[in-house]
């Protein structure tokens, strides 16, 4: 039995059960592959961020093993004391070269990269202009900075400019920030319009490119490359945990900005650095992006095939433009039931409801990868059709 002081948490969990919104963690028992075993069941995996299949790439696995043999399993300290290894510096140089910027710094996750950067570069006297559907890590970073936060309607550059006009005369720093690809809807930010506004009104322009890295642009260089805006975005955040296939996040900017983050970004200052095996794996991943562009081509071929199939069946896929394709249901309990029924039938597609998405916009979120076969995706569509009709979603 819980202590009296924690009983309220048990009560909240019981409410989730009564609302049919309680979810237990699915446990992966195999490699992260397009068909994998979760909870003892072989299912078509449509819930992984492993866009390019790099979690099992032979080159990445080999480099991890070599790094363990040479450097051991851990770094043993934070970066600012004794935890900066040659591999960490090599990784940051590799990222900077890939993203065509002066410098980069690696964080322990994409979440800490966003939150730590926004918190570090702003103060309570500054203003943040943020898209209403920006990732939780951006929202938390904005709150930690104590800056004033002004939110504009999703992808609405005109609404963004109205805010900028209102604060044009204020003596403060202004940060205009957006996701590159939005994680729940799979749509792409109107970056060219936002960059023009940032330049017009003297804003720092920052983008979280977590779901665009390895997906958009030449060899997966991201949204900035996709729109050919090199040199016009001040800060780019990316992830090493999705298409790169390993773990971590990174920030790209000017050399001075990166040096400042070395001194003031709290997650960087107070977290032990990446194990050498992870750093070596990530270096290899960026090399694979350059050497095997066919992986990205296959990702987009699979994406088009699957999207077309969903639309033909009558599913609502919202605004998606990328491999993230939501199937919008509306009611959270129905979305949860949909996900459970799909899993029982052989497809893992996780349901997402409030507070991750607004009330009334619950969905299952599907993500195809470069390593899915057309046969697997066709079978997944058949299962989605059967279950969707059973639950009267289509």
Image (cartoon, rainbow, N blue to C red):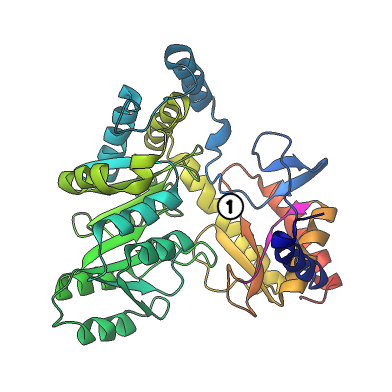
Q: Residue at coordinates 77% horizontally, 75% vertically from top-left?
A: 393
Q: Dot 1 corresponds to which residue?
A: 302
- Image coordinates for residue 302, horizontal then vertical, percent: 58, 52
Q: Is residue 188 above or below residue 380?
A: below
Q: How far across and how far down the image is residue 37, in percent?
A: 76, 40
Residue at image position (43%, 77%) is 154
209 vs 347, nearest the viewer: 209
Start-end of magenta stretch: 347-354
Residue 351 shown in magenta = yes
Q: Where in the figure is residue 182, as x and y percent of width and height?
A: 47, 64
Residue drawn at x 35%, y 71% is 190
Q: Residue furthest front?
A: 4
Dot 1: what SS?
Answer: helix
Residue pictured at 76% horizontal, 62% vertical: 10
How many neighbours does mark 1 have within 10 angstroms: few (below 14), some (14-19), or many (20 or more)?
A: many
Residue at the limit of the structure toward the top, as seen here? 69
Q: Is residue 14 left or right of residue 129?
A: right
Residue 291 spot, x, y in % from top left: 39, 32
């Amino acid at each position: 039995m819980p202590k009296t002081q924690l009983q309220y948490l048990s009560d909240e969990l019981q409410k989730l059960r009564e609302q049919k919104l309680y979810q237990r963690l699915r446990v992966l028992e195999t490699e992260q592959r397009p068909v994998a075993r979760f909870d003892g069941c072989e299912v078509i995996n449509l819930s992984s961020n492993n866009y390019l299949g790099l979690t099992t790439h032979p080159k990445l696995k080999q480099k991890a093993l070599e790094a363990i043999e040479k450097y051991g399993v851990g770094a043993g300290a934070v970066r600012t004391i004794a935890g900066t290894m040659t591999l960490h510096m090599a990784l940051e140089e590799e990222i900077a070269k890939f993203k065509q910027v002066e410098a980069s710094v690696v964080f322990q996750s994409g979440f800490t990269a966003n939150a730590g950067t926004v918190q570090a570069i702003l103060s309570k006297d500054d203003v943040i202009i943020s898209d209403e559907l920006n990732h939780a890590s951006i929202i938390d970073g904005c709150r930690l900075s104590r800056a004033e936060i002004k939110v504009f309607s999703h992808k609405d550059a005109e609404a963004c400019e109205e805010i900028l006009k209102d604060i044009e005369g204020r003596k403060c720093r202004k940060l205009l920030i957006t996701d590159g690809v939005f994680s729940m809807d799979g749509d792409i930010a109107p970056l060219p319009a936002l960059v023009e506004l940032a330049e017009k009104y003297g804003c720092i322009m920052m983008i979280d490119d977590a779901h665009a890295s390895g997906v958009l642009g030449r060899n997966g260089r991201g949204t900035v490359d996709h729109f050919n805006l090199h040199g016009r975005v001040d800060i780019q955040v990316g992830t090493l945990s999705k298409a790169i296939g390993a773990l971590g996040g990174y920030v790209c900017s000017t050399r001075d900005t990166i040096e400042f983050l070395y001194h003031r970004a709290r997650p960087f200052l107070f977290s032990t650095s990446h194990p050498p095996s992870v750093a070596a794996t990530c270096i290899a991943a960026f090399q694979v992006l350059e050497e095997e562009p066919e992986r990205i081509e296959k990702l987009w071929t699979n994406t088009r095939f699957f999207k077309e199939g969903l639309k033909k069946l009558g599913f609502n896929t919202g605004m998606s433009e990328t491999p993230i394709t939501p199937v919008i249901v509306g009611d959270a309990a129905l979305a949860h039931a949909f996900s459970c029924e799909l899993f029982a039938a052989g497809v893992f597609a996780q349901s997402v409801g409030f507070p991750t998405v607004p009330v009334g916009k619950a969905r299952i979120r599907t993500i195809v990868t470069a390593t899915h076969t057309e046969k697997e995706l066709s079978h997944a569509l058949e299962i989605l059709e059967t279950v969707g009709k059973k639950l009267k979603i289509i």
